[in-house]
């Protein structure tokens, strides 16, 4: 038998083998497995499934104090929701707050001390070096003026007291606060009264008429419950009337009953004209006239101002002004509010209008705020701007709780040339114009215990605790731990300070306590003591105190020293101003309240849907775009006071013609603002505060 | 080696010249394959498609090449079923073109889908209501048929014929060709129609939606007719082009005339029905969905000129030209008319795929435009390069035009 | 679902809550509003009047959960889109999806989204993923399913209590997150439900009603101008253009 195998046999064998393989289950197996593989790509994370637990806490991203319900899986928060029935937030949570649990793993998170050189280069730094630098400044200080500024981003926290104590212990250090929105207004209010008055808050909850000069009422005014108060409608609570006087159609203007577009920079004229209409229409209440020391002088002052030529610049008809004046005086529960970012003349004019309309000390008007027991008064504390120029060796920024941004230029102005350093206690290190050299890693929301003090739409104040709901990253600090490291002494822990605060609340016996487990609101005195209060607050409850009893209006002056001169000057400036080719209106980004950090998922309302104007973009009306020969998506440069900035142009028919609307925030626009507030730059910049309206020239790139 | 592969009696250019012709196409194919790699490895973010423009250049390409490749089935249908013997002169070329068009389309489709490894799910969990299921089934089956039709051509190669079993196989296959032509025709009618139905069923796209006859929207039938009309024209066009490039006559002029006449008469029927369909759509279908047809032509460059171009300029005009005996006397005019007819179909497929998606539906939608990324364009061009290469090799080594030998000796 | 447009401020809380609930990944670098993954998005629509009378309305837009002629269900070649007869919810099955995007071209509401990129979370963020919802992979379509994870959890809970699922047993994340309570969710077939009452109000309308897709998401506004600008078809908008 011939057993030799020919080449042909081999080929046949191979061919047969291949055919046989095709008929075998193998191809099907390969096909199946490959498809299964596409459903289980190893690089795509799957959620870890574990026991689901619920807990309650308080949001500390801004100072509003919203109640949070935390849903955790495997001991890690997976979603947040509002606490229904919470007295401050009524079950609401804003877009920023819904992502609080994502901040712990933000790509810009700092987990060890870092040194930043040339603005962007980061290297690991040694905590000891930073502490040594602070100590060196401390011991080298000889002059009477402080060499170290300790700036508190969110004054009023329990930890704020520790910062103040450090400044107290070290003669070379001084405590300061970030610019506080309400502070300038409180200062202005106090000037009107001879006796000491507390802080005031607008009682939006009970107001039946709200006249708002650009106040972002549905867009970051306290908790999101404010928007519900304004928009929800039940038979028990009909919608309040909202008149929004604002140059651009903001979200608030959009839902307002009436939106009155006003020429930017003339809001104070409008408020004064309404006040004058009330006076001339003999609509000022007798109670107001009785307490006022200078009613006649005000009438004369307003008359001498010769408002009509300035009013014509507002773009608002006399009939409209009369109508608002009539409504304000007819509606007992009415209030006039202004944007916290508005310049001083607008704040002053709005306060004057509130005084004329008699909204102070009234339900639905401006109501005096109670004080938090045990809290240090920070309303008199200085800001960084109040320090002497070129006097500081070290600026310590406590940014562990986000607060208002300090204009970048101020740092250079206050630091000693060449040698001054800025140390920030912050969870994040994102590129920003502020010249920070060292970042000390801070804990974020949910990692360590902190406290939040908030104000509700009804003018109530609250204290809540943000509880740890996830494991804290090692090597991160809260304010107490950081100060311990700096001073080398043992500082009281955050918990200890907070317990002292709760003890003060207990001993004050004022206010109510909200218990989320029941959920009920019970008076403080119904609790057994500090421990009972402490445990309720730890379980996500809060202490609230209503506005002080109305009381009677103390004697006041309409025109305290300097106000008449200031307003005369500003009205004259309005009359004299030549209309700019384009006016830039910068609005603050409602998602970045207190400069809260953008979580990564915020891309859904920014890049991925365009719901919010991205920073670095400016919006103009299509006709304005056409008139200046720029198109949608064009790169352009915005020149402000000689500074030119690259911007993207977005066309938006909601922006009135002749205006440029920009969103404040990161990037070029924020840079623009910090430059503008530099006192030494530009003639348009107001000497007292960052102006929100600047004539601009827009160039196509 | 090279010369031994060239069919006997045929004159082909020298191998270096052939290589010089082939190399640029190979390069283009290479670039395209790199683009394909990028798309498969990194995902479809390599393209400029987006959630609104979910279909882009590739789907347009698929619809177009499959319409042009229809010459294969329709010529087969005419030759084997209707016994139009004169078409034997182009059937081989038509089969190769069909194979190129269909395999190219399927290859691009595999890149176009987000999860190519799950492509077989359609066979496993088919949704019988989906036009795309119909398309997938028919196209894969028909591609198999085309491959089977292509095999005898290869087996006829001089070298392979030396193998007796191959010859036998080829002979047996040839006997079965009628069956395959029949199956192919049936499958083709269906998927050409289904491709039209793909858009015609989209009730959410009032620009494309058409009322149904039975289960198929009118575009189903219009696509069959338009493909049947474009197919012969494209065969005419390619045969002429190849003969120009090869610089030798390949088919007798009367074959051109026959192809032209067939294409023209079907095109005429198509244009008339398309006109009726358009009128029904303007007056009934679109208003019934709440849209005025004229509103679709208000955006960008997509004016109503497009309707005129599609139906009259590149529809009725070439149809009449192809049917005119005066035009038929001049190959140049005939080729022009065929080119116009093909352009009309290309334009129709463009309107169906691209304009449909560019137009807004919601009252607050914007009209969108879309420019393909280089990866999309490169993949698109790679299909063309692939086609040229397959055809070039087939032309060199296989006997695509049976008349070539006679015409040479004549 | 009924959405009261008069109450929508366009704050975006619903969009964020939706993304958190459904494990939608953050934007990949280079993502635009046209390639984003937003099961829910809020669109600003101008009412068409000229300055200064012009107003915008914010329209929360998600899958409209079409009824009988669901455009996406019928076109999917491999049954990766399912219509739940019991609830009327249209669900996407991403693991069966081929990524052909035919459903996306079929959807008149542009409420379907494609995973153009592989999902990526910053390191550590995978711990924050909702355990009730699977993540998706590159190359598949996805969309709103009225929080299927929550529905399943509610079903499990009802089953554990040996009672049938009640329509109010669960609320989608967007409904829960809306600060102004603009969104009402429930069983439209139950005439006593709040959602039915809201849906039967005369100022309620549906988007692209003429197409006959029968969406189960309704919108309402007391403003006739808003209703007109959201329901007008090209017939009326053309008139507008003629008038300039």
Image: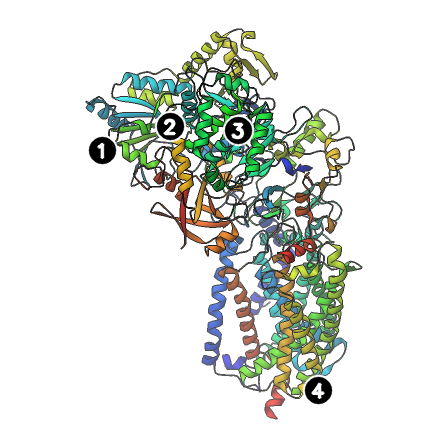
Residue drawn at point x = 44 percent, y = 48 percent = A582
Q: Is residue A264 above or below residue A135?
A: below
Q: Judging from the image, what secondary structure is the residue with disc 2 in?
A: loop
Position above or below: B89 against C129: below
> Which of the two discs, 1 and 3, labels the residue nearer the N terminus?
3
The residue under the point 22% across, 21% down is A144
The residue indicated by pointer 3 is A280
Q: Would residue A42 be seen by someone viewing this image from the given angle?
A: yes
Tell me whether marks 1 and 2 sit on the same chain. yes
Q: Indicate the quadrant where residue A558 lies.
A: top left
Depth check: give the residue in front, B368 or A202: A202
Residue that carries the numbered disc 1 in the rendered image: A419
Classify residue C164 as left or right of residue A604: right
Q: Quadrant of the C terminus of chain A?
A: bottom left
Of the 4 image quadrants, the one containing the N terminus of chain A is bottom right
Give the Cα separation between the discs numbered 1 and 2.
23 Å
Label 1 element class:
loop
Name the residue beneath numbered marker 2: A178
Q: Percent position (x, y) of residue B245?
A: 53, 82
C-alpha distance separating marks 4 and 2: 91 Å
- Same-chain check, marks 4 and 3: no
Picture coordinates of residue A536, whole percent (x, y)? 53, 14
Q: In the image shown, does A103 or A677 lie closer to the viewer?
A: A677
Distance between mark 1 and mark 3 Cα atoms: 60 Å
4 and 2 marks on the same chain: no
Q: From mark 3 to mark 2, how far is it between C-alphas? A: 41 Å
Picture disc at residue B27: none
């Amino acid at each position: 038998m011939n057993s030799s195998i020919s080449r042909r046999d081999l080929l046949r064998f191979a061919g047969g083998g291949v055919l046989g393989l095709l008929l075998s289950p193998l191809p099907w197996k390969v096909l199946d497995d490959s498809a299964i593989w596409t459903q289980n790509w190893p690089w795509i994370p799957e959620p870890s499934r574990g026991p689901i637990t619920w807990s309650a806490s308080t949001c500390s991203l801004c100072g509003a104090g919203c109640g949070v319900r935390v849903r955790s899986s495997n001991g890690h928060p997976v979603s947040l929701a509002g606490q229904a029935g919470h007295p401050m937030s009524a079950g609401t949570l804003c877009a920023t707050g819904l992502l609080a649990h994502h901040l712990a793993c933000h790509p810009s998170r700092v987990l060890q001390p870092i040194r930043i050189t040339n603005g962007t280069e980061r290297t690991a730094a040694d905590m000891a070096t930073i502490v040594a630098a602070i100590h060196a400044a401390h011991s080298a200080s000889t002059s009477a003026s402080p060499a170290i500024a300790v700036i508190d981003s969110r004054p009023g926290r329990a930890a704020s007291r520790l910062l103040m104590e450090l400044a107290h212990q070290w003669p070379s250090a001084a405590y300061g606060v970030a610019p506080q929105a309400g502070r300038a207004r409180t200062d202005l209010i106090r000037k009107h009264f001879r006796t000491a008055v507390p802080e005031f808050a607008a009682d939006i909850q009970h107001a039946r008429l709200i006249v708002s000069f650009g106040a972002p009422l549905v867009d970051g005014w306290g908790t999101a419950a404010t928007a519900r108060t304004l928009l929800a409608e039940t038979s028990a609570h009909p919608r309040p009337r909202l008149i929004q006087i604002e140059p651009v159609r903001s979200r608030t203007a959009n839902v307002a009953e009436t939106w009155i577009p006003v020429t930017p920079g003339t809001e104070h004229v409008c408020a004064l004209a309404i006040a004058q209409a009330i006076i001339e229409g003999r609509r000022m209440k007798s109670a107001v006239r009785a307490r006022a020391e200078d009613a006649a002088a005000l009438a004369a002052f307003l008359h001498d101002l010769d408002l009509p030529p300035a009013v014509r610049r507002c773009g608002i008809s006399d009939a409209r002004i009369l109508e608002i004046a009539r409504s304000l005086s007819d509606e007992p529960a009415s209030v006039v509010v202004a944007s916290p970012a508005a310049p001083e003349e607008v704040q002053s004019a709005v306060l004057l209008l509130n005084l004329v309309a008699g909204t102070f000390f009234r339900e639905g008007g401006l109501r005096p705020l109670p004080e938090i027991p045990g809290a240090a008064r920070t309303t008199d504390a200085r800001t960084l701007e109040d320090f002497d120029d070129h006097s500081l060796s070290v600026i310590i920024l406590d940014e562990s709780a986000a607060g208002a941004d300090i204009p970048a230029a101020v740092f250079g102005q206050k630091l000693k040339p060449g040698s001054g350093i800025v140390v920030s206690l912050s969870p994040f290190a994102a590129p920003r114009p502020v010249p920070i050299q060292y970042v000390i890693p801070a804990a974020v929301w949910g990692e360590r215990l902190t406290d939040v003090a908030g104000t509700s739409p009804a003018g109530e104040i609250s204290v809540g605790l943000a509880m740890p709901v996830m494991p804290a990253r090692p090597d991160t600090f809260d304010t107490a731990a950081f100060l311990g490291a700096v001073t080398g002494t043992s500082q009281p822990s955050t918990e200890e300070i907070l317990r002292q605060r709760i003890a003060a609340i207990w001993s004050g016996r004022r206010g109510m306590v909200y218990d989320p487990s029941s959920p009920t609101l019970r008076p403080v005195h119904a609790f057994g003591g500090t421990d009972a209060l402490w445990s309720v607050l730890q379980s996500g409850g809060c202490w609230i105190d209503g506005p002080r009893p109305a009381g009677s209006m103390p004697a006041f002056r309409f025109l305290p020293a300097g106000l008449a001169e200031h307003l005369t000057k500003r009205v004259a400036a309005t009359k004299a101003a030549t209309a700019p080719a384009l006016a830039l209106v910068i609005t603050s980004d409602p998602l970045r309240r207190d400069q809260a950090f953008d979580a990564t998922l915020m891309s859904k309302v920014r890049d991925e849907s365009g719901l919010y104007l991205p920073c670095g973009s400016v919006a103009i009306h299509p006709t304005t775009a056409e008139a200046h020969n720029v198109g949608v998506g064009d790169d352009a440069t915005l020149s402000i006071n000689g500074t030119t900035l690259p911007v993207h142009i977005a066309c938006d028919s909601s922006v009135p013609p002749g205006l440029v609307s920009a969103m404040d925030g990161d990037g070029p626009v924020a840079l623009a603002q910090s430059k503008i507030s530099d006192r030494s730059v530009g003639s348009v910049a107001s000497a007292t505060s960052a102006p929100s309206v600047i004539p601009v020239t827009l160039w196509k790139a | 080696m090279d010369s031994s592969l060239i069919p006997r009696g045929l004159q082909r250019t020298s191998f270096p010249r052939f290589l010089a012709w082939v190399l640029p196409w190979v390069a283009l194919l290479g670039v395209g394959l790199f683009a394909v790699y990028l798309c498969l490895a990194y995902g479809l973010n390599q393209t400029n498609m987006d959630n609104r423009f979910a279909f882009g250049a590739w789907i347009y390409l698929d619809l177009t090449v499959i319409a042009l490749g229809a010459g294969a089935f329709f010529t087969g249908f005419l030759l084997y079923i209707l016994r139009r013997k004169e078409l034997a002169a182009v059937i081989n070329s038509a089969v190769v073109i069909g194979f190129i068009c269909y395999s190219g389309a399927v290859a691009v489709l595999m890149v176009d889908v987000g999860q190519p490894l799950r492509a077989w799910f359609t066979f496993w969990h088919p949704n019988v209501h989906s036009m795309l299921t119909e398309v997938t089934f028919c196209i894969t089956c028909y591609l198999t048929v085309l491959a089977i039709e292509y095999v005898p051509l290869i087996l006829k190669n001089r070298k392979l014929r030396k193998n007796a079993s191959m010859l036998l196989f080829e002979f047996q296959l040839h006997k079965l060709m009628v069956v395959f032509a029949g199956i192919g025709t049936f499958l083709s009618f269906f998927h050409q129609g289904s491709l039209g139905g793909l858009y015609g069923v989209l009730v959410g796209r009032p620009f494309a939606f058409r009322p149904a006859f039975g289960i198929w929207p009118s575009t189903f039938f219009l696509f069959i007719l338009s493909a049947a009309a474009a197919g012969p024209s494209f065969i005419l066009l390619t045969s002429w082009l190849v003969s120009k490039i090869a610089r030798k006559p390949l088919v007798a002029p009367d074959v051109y005339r026959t192809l032209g006449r067939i294409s023209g008469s079907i095109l005429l029927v198509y244009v008339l029905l398309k006109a009726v369909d358009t009128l029904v759509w303007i007056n009934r279908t679109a208003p019934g969905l709440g849209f005025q047809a004229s509103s679709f032509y208000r955006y960008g460059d997509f004016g109503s000129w497009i309707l005129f171009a599609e139906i009259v300029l590149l529809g009725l005009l070439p149809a009449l030209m192809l049917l005119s005996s005066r035009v038929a006397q001049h190959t140049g005019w005939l080729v022009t008319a065929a080119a116009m007819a093909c352009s009309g179909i290309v334009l129709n497929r463009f309107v169906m795929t691209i304009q449909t998606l560019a137009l807004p539906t919601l009252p607050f939608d914007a009209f969108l435009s879309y420019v393909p990324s280089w990866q999309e364009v490169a993949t698109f061009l790679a299909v063309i390069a692939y086609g040229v290469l397959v055809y070039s090799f087939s032309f060199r080594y296989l006997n695509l035009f049976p008349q070539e030998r006679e015409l040479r000796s004549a | 679902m009924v959405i009261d447009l008069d109450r929508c401020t366009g704050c975006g809380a619903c969009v964020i809550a939706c993304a958190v609930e459904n494990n939608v990944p953050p934007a990949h670098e280079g993502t635009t509003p046209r390639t984003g993954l937003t099961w829910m998005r809020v669109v600003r629509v101008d009412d068409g009047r000229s300055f200064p009378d012009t107003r915008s309305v914010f329209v929360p837009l998600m899958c409209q959960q079409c009824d009988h002629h669901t455009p996406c269900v019928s076109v999917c070649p491999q049954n990766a889109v399912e219509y739940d007869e019991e609830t009327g919810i249209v669900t996407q099955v991403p693991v069966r999806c081929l990524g052909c995007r035919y459903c996306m071209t079929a959807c008149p509401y542009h409420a379907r989204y494609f995973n153009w990129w592989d999902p990526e979370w910053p390191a550590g963020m995978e711990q924050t993923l909702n355990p009730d919802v699977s993540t998706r992979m590159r190359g598949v379509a996805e969309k709103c399913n009225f929080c299927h994870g929550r529905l399943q959890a509610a079903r499990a809970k009802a089953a554990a209590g040996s009672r049938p699922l009640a329509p109010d047993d669960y609320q989608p994340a967007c409904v829960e997150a809306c600060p102004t309570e603009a969104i009402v969710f429930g069983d439209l077939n139950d005439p006593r439900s709040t959602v039915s009452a809201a849906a039967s109000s005369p100022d309620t309308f549906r988007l692209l009603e003429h197409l006959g897709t029968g969406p189960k998401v309704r919108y309402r506004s007391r403003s006739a101008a808003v209703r007109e600008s959201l329901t007008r078809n090209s017939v009326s908008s053309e008139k507008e253009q003629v008038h300039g």
